[in-house]
Structures are given as C-alpha cells and as structure tokens.
Amino acid sequence: MPNSVFGYSPTVIALLTLLTPLASAAVIALFLRRQGSIAALISTFTAALVAAGGLTLAFGGYREAAVDASTAWLTLGNFTLSLGIKFDDLSALMISIVGVVGLCVHVFSLGYMHDDSAKARYFGGLSIFMFSMLGIVLADNLFMIFIFWELVGFSSYVLINHYDHRQTAADASKKAFITNRVGDFGFLLGIIACYYVFGTVNLTQITAAAGTGDTSLTLIALLLFCGAVGKSAQVPLHVWLPDAMEGPTPVSALIHAATMVAAGIFMLCRIEPLFAAAPVALTVVMWVGAVTALYAALCAITQSDIKKILAYSTLSQLGYMVAAFGLGRLDITPDGETSKMALITAGAAAAMFHLTTHAFFKALMFLGSGSVIHGCHHEQDIFKMGGLAKKMPLTFITFTIGVLAIIGMPAIIGMPFLAGFFSKDAILYLAMENNTPVFIILAFSAVLTAFYMVRLWRLVFFGAPRTEDASHAHEGGISMVLPLIALAILSVIGGYTAIYGNAFKAVWSQIPVAHGAAHTTILIVSVAVMLVGAGLALVLYKPAATDALAAKSPALFALLSVLKGSFDGVYNWYVAKVQQRFALLLEFLERIFLSGLIIRGLSGVVGLVGLGARALHVGSLHAYVYWFLFGAAVLWAFAGGWLN
Amino acid sequence: MFTHLLLLSIAAPLAAAAVISAGIPARLAKVVAALGFLAPALIALHVWYHFSAQTLNQGYAFTTSYATGLQSLGIKLTLGLNGIALPLYVLAGVVGLAAGLYAIQSGAERIKTYLALLLIMQAGLMGVFASVDIFFFYFFHELALIPTFIMVGVWGGKDRGYAAMKMTIYLTAGAMLSLLGLIAIYYKSGAENFDLITLRQTILQGGIAGGAQNLIFGLLMFGFGILVSLWPLHTWAPLGYGAAPSSAAMLHAGVLKKFGLYGLVQIAVPLLPLGAAHWAQPLAWLAVAGNLLVIGFITIAQRDLKQMVGYSSVMHMGYAFLGVATLSAVGAGGVILMMVAHGFSVSLLFLLSTSVYHRTQTFDLTEMGGLAQKTPVLAAFFVTATMASIGLPGLANFWGELTIFVAAWQFSKVLTVLAVSGVVISAIYGLRAAARVFFGQHTEALTKVLAEKPATDLRWSEKIPALILIAALFFIGFWPKSLSTPLNAALEAVYPAKGPTITIVGQ
C-alpha cells in the first residue's frame, strides 16, 4: 500500500477532500454573492477535486491504518467529542458515489442554472452540501456523524428553498427540516444512550463492543434508526421528500435521490453489528422498509408531476434498501463459511449495492427530467409533454437506460444486464431466503415500479407533443448532456462488481448471490415481475392528455390518491388543530394566571421578603435610582466609620 | 502588562459616559461612545488570547486588588478571571461592542443620554464577570441593571411604562433574594471577606451545614432564577424585551441575564453542593416542564417577532437550568457554553428583528412575507441567527445544548427525552418566523408599507455589528476548545467528575 499521494499522506488527502468544499462555500458566501458565474466555476472545480480525491483514496488502496486519524474537538469533564476519519471499504464506496454523482450534478447545474438570479447562493449551497455529506462519510464516531447529519439537513433546507419567493418552496424547506429534526430527536438520544452503554461513540469501538450490550440494545438500535427514518424518508417521516421537489432539479438528483437520503442507509451499515445483536430492532427496520417500498410505489402511480413520480420512486427504492438491511444476514453462504468475519452482513451489503446502482440510475433520471423540464420551459406535468423522444434524443436514450435499470431489465439476450437488475435481484433473493411476506411485498412493489416508470416514460417521450412547450423542446447544452452520458454508462456497468476491482471487496463479497435452483427462481421472478408491470403500463397508457387509470377505474385512482394524501392530512390536522391550539391555550393560561393572578400575589410576597422594598419601587424609576445611590453612599459611610 | 487591564475595561466605558455627559456635540459623542465600547471588547479578546499562557492563582488569572474604603467590611475590589468567568467576560465585551455600534447608528432621540446609559451598563457587565469579590459581583450587576430600567422606560416601544415597572419589580426582587443568599454564604462560611477565593477556601475547611445549605441555595436558586427567567417567574422577560430598545434588549438578554446562571455555576453549586443536590430535582423539572415545554409551545403561538425572540430566550434558559441541575462538570460546562452562544445569538436576533421592523414598520409576523426578495443579506443573516439559536452544528449554540443533553442523561432519562424534544420545538418556531418574514410573497399590509417606503438591504452600519456577532457564533462553533479548555480546567477543580469512564474495547 503506497503511503503518499504526490507527497501528501492519505490522511491529508482525505482532509483536503473534506475541507475544500467548505472553503469554496466560505469564499462564495463572503466574496462572490454577486458573481454567480465565478461562484459556479469555483464550486464545480471543487466538486472535481472532491471526485479526484475520493477516487484516489478509494481506488488507490488507502485504507484504515493509512488514512484514519482523530483529534479531540471538545472536552468537558470526562466527555470528549472527537473529530476523526474512519476510511474502510464502506466509506471508500460512499465517497466514490458522492464524488462522481456530485461532479455530474455540478456540471449539469452549470447549464441548468445558467440564468438563475441567485446562482451564487445555489452553488454555495451545493458546496456546503458536499462538505457536510463527506463529513458523514468519513466520520469515525456517531457524534461527528450527527453533526454533519444536521449540516446536510441545513444545506437541504437552503437548496429546497432556492426559489424562496414561492410559498410552496418556503413551506417545503421548513417541512423538510422539521421532519428531519423529529427523526434526529431519536437519533441524538440513541447516540447519547450509546455513549453511556458502551462508554464510547467511536464506530470501531462500538462495533467491537456491540455483542456486550445489555437489553437496552434494542432500544438504542431503534433510537438510532429514527435518524435513518428521518433522513432516508421512511414511513411515517417520508412526507418531506415529495415536497422537497420544490428545489431545483439537479438538487433533487444529488441530495434527494442519490446521496443525502441514502445517508440513513449508510449510517445503518456503519453500526450494523448493533442491529445484529438486536434482532427485534432489525425486524422493525425490515418492516418499515418494506412498508415504505410498497406505500411509495402505490403513491407514484397517480402522480402527474415528473419530479413527484421520481420522488416517490426514490422513497420506494430507499424502502428496498432499508428492508434489505433489515433482512439481516444470510445463513447460507456459497462457500459454506459464515459471514461473521465480514465487515457487514448480507443485508447491509445488498442495501449498499442497491444504494450504489440507485445513485447512478436515479441521478440519471432526475437529471434527465431536469433536461426535459429545461427543454419544455419549466413544464413538469407529464400529461403536457409527449413526443420528446424525437425532440431530445440524447435525453431519451439516457433516460431509457435509467428506466430499464430501475425496473431491473436484464435487457435483450446478448445485451448486458443493467445495474439495477443485479442489486434488486440481490435484495429479492435475500428476502426469498429470509422472509416470505417481505419477499412478496417487495416483488409486488417491483411490479408497481415497472408500471409507473413505463407510464412516465411512455407519456413523456412518445406520441405527439401535447403542448406548445413540448413541441418546442430542445436539448440543453453540452454541460447538461455530458453528465447524462456519464451516468448512463454507470447505470449500465455499475451493477458488475468486477469493474470496481478489489476496492470495495469487504462490501461486495457479502452481496447475497443465488446459486442453482434459487438462481433460476429469482431470475424468473424478477423478469416476470418486470414484464407484468411494464406490460400493464404499455397496455393501459397511450400518449394522451389525461390519466387513463383515472378514466378506466376512478375508484382505484381515488383510493390511491387518498392513500397518498393520508399522512399529510393527519399531520396537517395535528399541526393546525392540536399543536397550534395547545400552544394558544398555554399562552392564554399564561396571560390569565401567571401574569394576571399569581404574579400579582407573588410580587407582594416577594416584596415582603425584600423588606418592603416593593413600596419603594412602585413610584417611579428615578426613585429606585436614588435609593440605590443613597444605599451605596450609606454603605461607604458606614464602612469608612463616619457614621460612628 | 495585564495589571490594570480588567479595571480599564470597566473604567473606559464609564469614562466615555462621563465625557458624553459633559455636553460634547452629538457627533463627537458617537465617536467617544464607539471608543468606550471598543476598549472593553479589545481588552476581552486580548485577555482571552493570553489566558492559556497565564500562571493561575487558585484558578484565577490577571488578579488585582484595589482598596475601596470598605475593607473594614471585608470588601475589596478584586478583579480577576478564571476559566468560568473568562467566556462570559468575552461575551460581555463582544456583545457590548455590537450593541454599542448598533445604538450609535440607531438614530434614537436624546442619543447622548441613551449612549451614556448604555456605556454605564457596559461597565457594569464587564465588572460583573471580572469580579472575584462577590460584593462587587453584585454591585456591578446593579450598576448595569438600573440603566436597563431607564432605557426601557424612556426609549422603549409599546407598553414601555408597564414593562419597565414590571421588570423593575421582578428584577429587584430577584436581585434582593440573591443578595440575601450571597450575604448568607458569607456569614455562614465565617470567612473574613467577600473574596470568592477566600470564601471557597474557608468553606472547604469548615463547610456549611446541610440545612443552611438548603435554605441558602433555595434563596439563590429563586433569586437568580427570577433574573434568568426561570418558569414561572419569567413573565417580565418577553414583556420587557418586547418593549426594550434593541441595544438594551441585546445587552440585557444577551449578557446581563446570564448573571444569575453564572452565579449558580460559579458560586452557588460549588460552595453549596448539598443544597444544590437538595434542589436539583425541582430545578430540573421547572426548567424542562416549564421553560422548555410550556414556554416552547407558547413561543410557537407568538405572532409578534420580538415577543417570539423574547420567549425563545426564556425557553433556551431551560436547557441552562437543566445543565446546572446535573451538578456535573459536563453539565456546568454546557451551561457556560450555552450562555455564551445564546448571548451572541439572541442579541443578533434582537438586532435583526429591529432591522426588520425598520423595513416593515411592524413586528407582526402575519403582516410580513417575502422580504428576502428586497433584503437578501438581512434574510441570510436572520436565517443564520435562527439556525444558531436552534442549535445547528458549526454555530456556537450546538455545543452547549449537546453537552447539557449528555450530562442530563445521567441525571434523569425522562427529563433528557423531554428536553431533547426542545430541538424540534425550537425548529418549529424558528423556521416558521424566518419563513413568515422573508419567504413567499408579500402580504397586502407589507405591499402597502413597501409602496410608501421601499425596503433597502442592510446598511453597513447595521451589517458591522451583526457581522461581529455572526463571526463570534462561527468561531466558537468551529473551535469550541478556545473556550472549553480553560473552562474545563476550572470546572474540574470544583465539580465532581461524572459520566461513563471511557473503556477502550479491544479490537
């Protein structure tokens, strides 16, 4: 293992990778508020450096001993909070994803946000996001993860609120932040509990000690999971993610699809041994994931906004990852050895694998939708598009690759399997081995996935243009096309773990792979699932200006719409009718009792204690000043002996 | 080189006040006032920078004594700083400068009197935290308090008469209870003077009986509690801050209010450990159920921006009281960090709220909206201040909240769970206020106001004091050690070590 890169130690490279985006954000905030274009270039250049630094570390073979470092940041009593780097295969994988997708999104943004009036703030926000996300990836302890966890939440807030004159954007950003805070409430408690149970929050030490935890372990694991429920938008805290689509589309690609929302899954994998020692918690995680996967897929069906469909799709895919994690270890491994020696279990490996391929194909589709929206003059309704395959061929081809990847297309015989196929297969296989109900739910969700994605694809790209905007659609500039091509390539090859060499071996080696009969079964299931979903969508949806499902089966359509609105309905009711009223009631009581009755009585008592001082104060303020001066004078006179 | 610096930090603003009162022209008065505020700020930063290199005497650096003619009563003006006082001394200097600069540009009527009063207040604030002698600790508090009353009563906004009166009654009552407690410590300890160092040594040798400790700590807890707006003795605070002119609110909410908590951490808990243990549970419950939850919800209900900031400040004191109640070095350290951070963030919020008012002509949140389109810098500053106040990492407030939560877990898990829910509550009212003022579209009311007087973004005279505070928030947010290292050394000497012993698990 080489010990330096261009004369710098790997630790320094990791630090520079982490801090460069922070420097970029600081420079932009301080000096480039009005120089949007310069800010854009600096931020993009920074993203390129991050990608270079991340990939160098990941593929250069620099791992733990060579990179890791730690320093105390704050010490009070015997509590110490450290800043440190833990760089194993898992963080190497994550830093590669963040670097590559981050760079693609930055480059895409150069074109997409070209005419934006607040470009500096936008790119500053992207840089602060990159910094925060890298902090989570590199962190060696839970408090540090929490710190950067909050910071990604902040950058998400700023970027969702980018079009801040829109009430919807203002509401969405607020909702995202507060919902995440609800999850972080549990997360923080879990970290503190961890600190007391294990005496440390260091990831390496926790994982080593996980087996020694007592019965509180289940509770701790569930509290920590709260963080992932918020950040990775699992039911019931998923409500912020669809609204977050108010942000600019490249932001949706980077933050609300590929990286930040996946941080929850990454965090779970980081502390996986805790869950391994708490099977009840793991079961809860599995069910939350499965429910989210199904629920979100159902919601996606009735959406007409291209970004909302992708958002629900993201929710659903995140549900897959969380469910995969919850499925836990696979008891049978091909070579007969148990997976206990591994960094993570089969479930975590399958989750990370899907996280990787999803990052590529979902970022691709979001950027593709950005390209479509940009081409159609900010039209987002798929029923007002149509015929874009001819107008925007490159977007069409790359988007199609994304669609094939997400629906798990093994493509035509002789063609390569697409990325999503492998990772979704791994999850389905694991579910089939470990838990049949979850397997059925996930397989059914896969039908729905194929259904709503093909629906979107058909309505957007085929038939005749249905609006003026759609008929004048055009491809964006080179900066918008290049990232699409790059991500499309990754979506094709990203599922072949061989292309990564040995870089992420500790993760990839644990991916559950079916053999023999199981292999055949799973292949048949996933192809069937895909064909059924896609076929139904092709039959049902012709390029048209109205939703065919709403026309043919209004009852089903209405039911799905109600399902989608149910959580928001309950939360809005709570905020308006419970929280606000409770707050007003308390305020009323305070005015009546505390300020009115009790305090008037109390002030009398206090006045007595104060040797009747109150009588002296009721008059005017000046009286008080004079009494104070008088008292001081008397005191000095007394001390000086003049009174004797 | 440090001999008289602490005294100078008190004398300089007083001298500036005297010069201004002597009847110099207003323009010159502003320059003098600026110097009067600048001196303590620079001195504070200077001693902060050099603190770590000092040889400490009983934990104190820069100790100097001055004869005052009160020696026969055991009172000497002894100035000095230990690790607990240092952060607050720095806070006083920096917030004082920001509040002073903001006052200078405020265009208040009778500006010279206003500035003179503010300078007297500043002298008192520097004195409070530089005093080793608890008589002067109290004396300087009164010196700072009186100008507050006058400023609220004369330069205040709506309901200023009532607000000033209520503040006076409450704070005087609180101060008197505290005075009683302080005198009782002195009396019971049998020490020969009011010097905190001597008091501590005497008590270490003799100790105060448990019963007396309970009584005295109770007096101090409620006395200081009133001053820091412990629920349900807080009602003066939102009313008072709502009416106070912004610089007075900045200095009082930001700095002077911390007198009480500082007294608890520096004096009451270390000197009266049994009394503190006796009262810890009720104190923690009042703090969490009262300040954090009840006031938290009341804050959500506020429609008036300044009242909202006032209530939020009452709420955040709940964290601090909880930290005090844990009776541990981690908790007490958290309280000090929290106070410093809160001092910066709440004074910044008061400053920016006033700047918002100058553009919207109202504090009513329902009559604003979309201001960010006209004033992006003001909006960015306001969001920064809000993020600081709701404990975003990278800004100072995070450290205090986090360490208090960590300390609280060992004290009571139930209270910790309730207290941590405060992070959600504060996010709700904080972000809601920011959104209502700055985002979305203008309300009709605001459109009318803006039609008459178009809003311009922050002027440099407003930006500079705000930037001073923002810089402080970021500095401590990124480098908490600059405060926590001296702080921890001081706390470990007087507070019992608590918390898990770190066990390094073999790999």
Image (cartoon, helix red, strand yellow):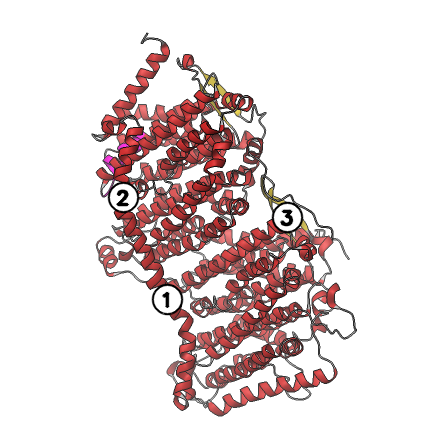
Q: Which residue is mark 1?
A: A572
Name the amino acid type tagged 1: Asn
User: Is residue B395 found inside the magenta-colored segment of the image?
Assistant: no
**A352 to the left or right of B192:** right
Residues beneath discs 1 and 2 located on the same chain? yes
Q: Compared to A31, does A314 lie above or below?
A: below
Nearer-the-camera pick, B267 or B253: B267
- C-alpha span from label 2 to label 3: 46 Å
Query: Badge 3 local density, few (<14 within 10 Å), some, or many (20+)?
Result: many
Q: Secondary structure at mark 2?
A: helix
The alpha-carbon separation of the residues under discs 1 and 2 comes to 32 Å
Q: Which residue is mark 3?
A: A199
Q: How many marks?
A: 3
Mark closer to the observer (1, 2): 2
Read off the magenta span: B146-158
Q: Looking at the image, is mark 2 or mark 3 earlier in the sequence?
A: 3
Viewer-closest of B465 and A585: A585
Q: To which residue does mark 2 refer?
A: A595
* Mark toward the start of the polypeptide (1 vs 3): 3
List x then y, in percent, for residue A83.
Answer: 61, 49
Check the residue under mark 3 and report the chain it is in: A
Q: Amino acid at mark 2?
A: Ser
Q: Residue furthest front?
A: B211
Residue type marked 3? Gly
Q: Give the x, y percent position of residue A455.
A: 49, 85
- Chain containing the residue with disc 1: A
B21 to B236, vertically: above or below: above
Residue B125 in the image, given as x and y percentages of width and height? 39, 30
Residue at horizontal 69%, vertical 87%? A414
Q: Callout 1: few (<14), some (14-19), or many (20+) C-alpha neighbours within 10 Å?
A: few
Numbered disc 3: secondary structure = loop
Residue B370: which disc? Answer: none
